[in-house]
């Protein structure tokens, strides 16, 4: 038999493999994060017909005479170039810009992917919607500055409506209740005495509180912390109302409600902040919110410090007293929003930090929730495809280096965007034509070899 027959057969088989790879590339042209593959051929062993000879003084050397025995599959390589971006507007969609992979837990197996079209399940866990694999990352501590544990990636779980960790004690229920129709003492209609000065967070069922000094309209009331008086609209009938007055008594140093600690003569640390713009009372001294960072006479400023709030009081010359006159038994009171900040929105930055916006209906604060983990490899192309857009490590990929995006050569993250396939149809169609012609040429070799064999057989005639 002729060697050309078998050489041509090897050509047919390996061009079929190349066509299979091209077909797979084209079928995944719209697969998120897909990386195209290419086929490389190599020569098979050759048959030596004559060995090479070395040159002598009188005769030159000759080369080896060999006949090739066909082609073999050299490699199928993944081309890990960056795919184009596609904006989605979905907050949980992410694209990796550069070298790296998202890390997921797929039913106990750690897998890697470039496909960042993520979503959330009913528990708020960040997942791959197609498989339920859980996106891995690092949760942030209450101090809002550093992750709890680096290197130990875990599930990321959050959802709209989550309560801010520092607000877990809201709403505060240690309150007293007065009956509008029975416990209030009439002074001058429509003004009544509650008997409680400097009460915190004073509300009345069914009515809206307006600032002290404002004339209440229908459905409104005001409360003067200095006198303990509440004022209603002129036509409000207290005797027939079933509404109740709710309030929290002024807190002293060490009180469990506010956990006040004196940091210095003019600074007090509390667990929750005053309602924006409200007045603060230290015993009988009133302080108003300062418009600058430095409080003047009778003013205060407040800022968040390590999950608590630090109130700095300026001097107050009322009745000759100052803030420095406050003792450990001094009472502090102010209006606050008696409900927790809850997650209303979130965003993901280029380093993968998920920052939540928490609101209690009055003010908003931000807090870092978690950070997306990103893995890098010494040889990305050595990762093995296991389906579902997932890859796993192999003997030649190297171990993953898992950490923050944008560090140590890892890709940065682009949110609200996914990475498209890097398949180029013009390249695939060109390769298809070349593969088709290669297959046809090998077919023609078989046909011609068959003709030669036919001529050989016909010699007997």
Image (tube, grey):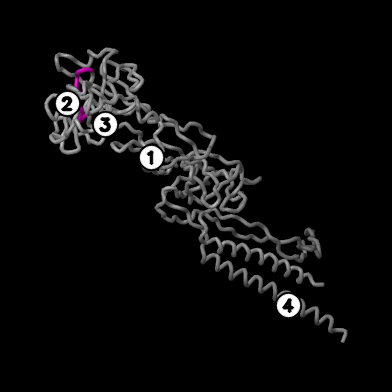
Q: Is residue 293 above or below residue 106?
A: above
Q: Which residue is mark 3?
A: 275
Mark positioned earlier in the residue sequence (1 or 3): 3
**Disc 1 marks which residue?**
343
Quadrant containing the C terminus is: bottom right
For mark 1, give the secondary structure: strand
Q: Which residue is tagged 4?
A: 447
Sequence order check, earlier mark of 4 and 1: 1
56 or 102, nearer to the observer: 102
Residue 192 badge? 2
Residue 101 appears at what percent x and percent y? 53, 46
Q: Nearer the viewer, mark 3 or mark 4?
A: 3
Between the residue at mark 2 and the residue at mark 3, the CA separation in whole angstroms equals 24 Å
Q: CA distance from mark 2 to mark 1?
A: 39 Å
Q: Residues within 10 Å of mark 4 (few under 14, many from 20)?
A: some
**Does the residue at mark 2 contact the one at mark 1 (Cβ under 8 Å)?**
no
Q: CA distance from mark 1 to mark 3?
A: 19 Å
Helix, strand or loop under label 3: loop
The residue closer to the viewer here, 445 or 167, is 167
The disc, 2 or 4, on the residue closer to the chain's N-terminal end is 2
The mark nearer the N terminus, 3 or 4, is 3
Q: Given this view, does label 2 or label 3 mark the residue nearer the observer?
A: 2
Q: Relative to 76, is 321 above or below?
A: above
Q: Furthest residue to the bottom?
A: 461
Identify which residue, 378 or 59, lies in the foreground.
378
Q: Is residue 12 above or below residue 338?
A: below
Q: Marks 3 and 4, Cα distance to the nearest angstrom? A: 90 Å
Q: Magenta part of the protein: which range?
A: 283-292
């Amino acid at each position: 038999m002729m060697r050309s027959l078998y050489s041509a057969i090897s050509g047919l088989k390996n061009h079929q493999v190349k066509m299979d790879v091209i077909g797979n590339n084209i079928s995944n042209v719209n697969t998120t994060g897909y990386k195209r593959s290419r086929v490389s051929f190599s020569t098979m062993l050759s048959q030596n017909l004559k060995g090479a000879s070395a040159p002598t003084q009188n005769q030159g050397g000759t080369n080896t005479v060999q006949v090739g025995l066909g082609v073999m599959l050299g490699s199928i390589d993944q081309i890990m170039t960056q795919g184009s971006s596609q904006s989605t507007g979905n907050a949980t969609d992410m694209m990796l810009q550069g070298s790296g992979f998202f890390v997921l837990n797929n039913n106990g197996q750690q897998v890697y992917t470039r496909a960042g079209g993520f979503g959330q399940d009913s528990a708020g866990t960040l997942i791959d919607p197609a498989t339920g694999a859980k996106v891995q990352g690092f949760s942030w501590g209450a101090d809002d500055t550093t992750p709890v544990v680096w290197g130990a990636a875990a599930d990321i779980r959050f959802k709209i409506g989550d309560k801010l960790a520092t607000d877990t004690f809201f709403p505060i229920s240690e309150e007293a209740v007065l009956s509008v129709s029975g416990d209030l003492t009439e002074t001058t209609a429509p003004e009544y005495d509650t008997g409680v000065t400097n009460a915190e967070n004073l509300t009345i069922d069914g009515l809206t509180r307006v600032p002290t000094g404002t004339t209440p309209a229908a459905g409104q009331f005001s409360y003067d912390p200095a006198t303990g008086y509440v004022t209603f609209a002129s036509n409000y009938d207290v005797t027939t109302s079933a509404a109740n007055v709710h309030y929290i008594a002024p807190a002293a140093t060490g009180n469990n409600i506010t956990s006040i600690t004196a940091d210095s003569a003019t600074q007090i640390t509390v667990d929750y902040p005053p309602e924006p713009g409200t007045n603060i009372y230290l015993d009988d001294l009133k302080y108003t919110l300062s418009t600058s960072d430095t409080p003047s006479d009778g003013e205060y400023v407040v800022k968040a410090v390590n999950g608590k709030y630090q109130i700095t009081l300026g001097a107050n010359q009322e009745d000759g007293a100052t803030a420095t006159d406050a003792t450990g038994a001094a009472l502090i009171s102010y209006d606050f929003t008696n409900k927790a900040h809850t997650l209303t929105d979130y965003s993901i930055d280029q380093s993968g930090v998920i920052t939540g916006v928490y609101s209690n209906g009055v003010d908003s604060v931000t807090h870092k929730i978690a950070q997306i983990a990103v893995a890098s490899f010494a040889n990305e192309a050595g990762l093995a495809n296991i389906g579902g857009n997932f890859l796993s490590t192999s003997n030649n990929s190297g171990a993953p280096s898992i950490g923050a995006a944008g560090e140590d050569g890892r890709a940065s993250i682009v949110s609200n965007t996914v990475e498209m396939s890097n398949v180029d149809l013009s390249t695939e169609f060109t390769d298809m034509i070349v593969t088709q012609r290669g297959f046809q040429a090998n077919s023609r070799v078989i046909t011609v070899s068959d003709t030669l064999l036919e001529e050989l057989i016909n010699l007997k005639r």
